[in-house]
Image: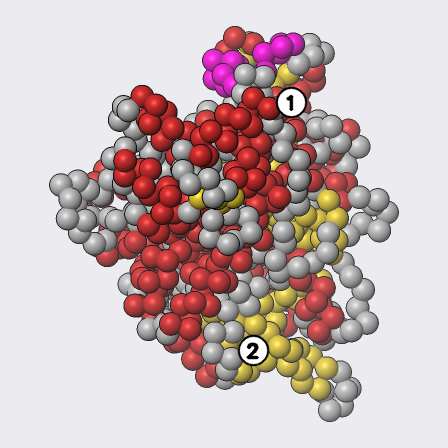
Amino acid sequence: MAFRKVLKRTAIIGGGAVATVFGLSQLIEYRKTQARLAHVAAEAELKVPFANEFPSRQSQLAALRDTEEFDVLVIGGGATGAGCALDAVTRNLKTALVERSDFSSGTSSRSTKLIHGGVRYLQKAIMKLDYEQYMMVKEALHERANLLEIAPHVSSALPIMLPVYKWWQLPYYWAGIKMYDLVAGTQCLKPSYVLSKTKALELFPMLKKDKLVGAIVYYDGQHNDARMNLAIALSAARYGAAVANYTEVIHLLKTKDPQTAKETVRGARCRDVITGQEFDVRAKCVINATGPFTDSLRKMDNQETSKICQPSAGVHIVIPGYYSPDNMGLLDPATSDGRVIFFLPWEKMTIAGTTDSPTNVTAHPIPGEEDINFILNEVRNYLSPDVEVRRGDVLAAWSGIRPLVTDPNSKDTQSICRNHIVSISDSGLVTIAGGKWTTYRSMAEETLDAAVKAHGLKAEPCKTVGLMLEGAKGWNQTLYIRLVQDYGLENEVAQHLASTYGSKAYDVAKMAQVTGQRWPIVGKRLVSEFPYIEAEVLYAIKEYACTALDIIARRTRLGFLNVQAADEALPRIIELMAKELNWSQERKTMELEAAKKFLYHEMGYRSRSEQLTKTTEINLDNQEVARYKKRFHKFDKDRKGFITTVDVQQVLESINVHIDENSLHEILNEVDLNKNGQVEIDEFLQLMSAVKKGQVSDSRLAILMKSAEETLENRGPVTVDRSGGGV
């Protein structure tokens, strides 16, 4: 520990002073030895009460209700809250955690999916000689290395390209990126390097060629944020913490000293959101780790307290994978308004974001059309003109609220530091506010150090450095091959399971049903184009999934990747959960409505209909109108002015194409704006106008009708595949 403090004091010179004293090779070996010792110590000293199976949610609620007093009660199940719970329980403290929704349902599942030190913060630190921001980057780079080590199955290094379009920027950016490597020191993932224009275009062929002089590539980490959060919470449960999602705090419990009349927080009155049952959870120390809702809980403690958080909205969009190479991200360091935009491959799609603007705190943030178009415009600035960036290619969009620490002198959230603060109120409520995903572990350590000191808790030192998270122990890069060979899973499905559940992928595979096909032998997909299988729904219930929304948003990432695919998977997901959890028909209907509402508002599904209805003008010339009317009348043979599923079915049968009635109804419903069960000619022309302008892409009805028309004219065979669909 003493050596760690020395490193912090000398960090401003990149470790040079330490390297001089110890010698570089000795320093590298020392750090490696310390990491190994930390890992060995963490694994050896800890007892694992639930090594085989987790206690059920009912058992966890019973533990919360029946335990006389916990040492620590953590409120909030995001990355920071789960990190605090894991830190506390591994210090041998009796620990509880409650979350009013699902684990990572807020900000922690809506990030840029990066594990990073913060390149732009380093730039600010150097330009403004800001030591605090420098140390934040230094700490984040240390935590980045640790997180990649303790959860290698859900995280990996990702090369990110910084394209350069002016010669003078090349040495400027190169110096900054090299400083980033230098600050990381021996924990640098891979050295950054410079690329010529030719090589840059070879690695990122969709990049804009004009005026490109070269590029710089550096490395950061990338992860599945929701799964990482869940791995932290599940690890805490493994080690004996009583954790419960869908458990909200109604009010804090306080005791009053009869002599001084001072009130002290000693727990919380909680309510099971699923059943409505209320109960008290008593604890010596209560930790507020509620992210954007930090001030709400602080005011629950003291109505007069001042606000310390300034919420900032960050919007991301997901577009098809062909917009970026499989393993190369892009950084736009200077957008039109000074914000930084990342353009990254993620889960075989492309994620672009983020915006940064003041917002109000809400549990259901909605991505705005203005932010979506801002991101698309920035993407257009960096991609070749040959690549048409269409609004209709947005498959999903979401907004996350960052809980930034307020700087009273700041005029906008862009200049607010992502640093964190730990505060303790007069009544003893411990609050951890601010920070970033990457530093969740060190934030938790600092929070528990403060809590232990303030409340006189008998605790062991922090053990989370090097502590492997759920699924990490026993994982290796070839694990998926065993899944294919031993269980008969598809290669893509096996890779997904291995990179999501780690060594626990075997448990999921054992639950997979036989397909009845020659191959794959087991593993029925929820939707054809994504590797999520039905067994994951059943396994998710063991991991405390309570709603269909938990499945599409966090246990799988369907809702974040393609809202249309998520919508199509919902009926089967609900059917599987209903059978396992004995849901009534009323509950099934409620689950479907809640999940659809989430997709419609929070994941950008409503944008599809808005793109069709926000303008009454049909932007087609006379020739195009005539062509599309001719196509429409091949289906509307009676010239009714509208078509129904029956009309479409008759045409398809005439060309030997068969689509089941439910699927056909879904296809027409996407374009049926007034929801009267039929598509009128004006709606069809509006659709084709939106397709022309790029507001809608890959419309299934548009593609189906075009293919049918061509087949009717040529009388040749036609296949109609399900398109990706945009929102």
Examine the rendered structure and indicate whether residue 558 appears above or below residue 597. above
Q: Residue at x 72, y 87 (%)?
A: 257
Confirm whether residue 647 shows in the render.
Answer: yes
Residue 592, horizontal then vertical, whole percent: 44, 62
Q: Residue at x 28, y 55 (%)?
A: 535
Q: Which residue is denoted by mark 2 in the rendering?
A: 270
Residue 159, horizontal then vertical, whole percent: 50, 27
The residue segment tinted magenta is 200-216
Q: Secondary structure at mark 1?
A: helix
Q: Residue at x 42, y 41 (%)?
A: 638
Q: Secondary structure at mark 2?
A: strand
- Which comes before the other along the chain, label 1 or label 2? 2
Specify the quadrant of the image occupied by residue 712: top left
In-front residue for pair 679/69: 679
Q: Which residue is denoted by mark 1 in the rendering?
A: 381
Q: Residue furthest bottom?
A: 258
Q: Residue at x 38, y 47 (%)?
A: 645
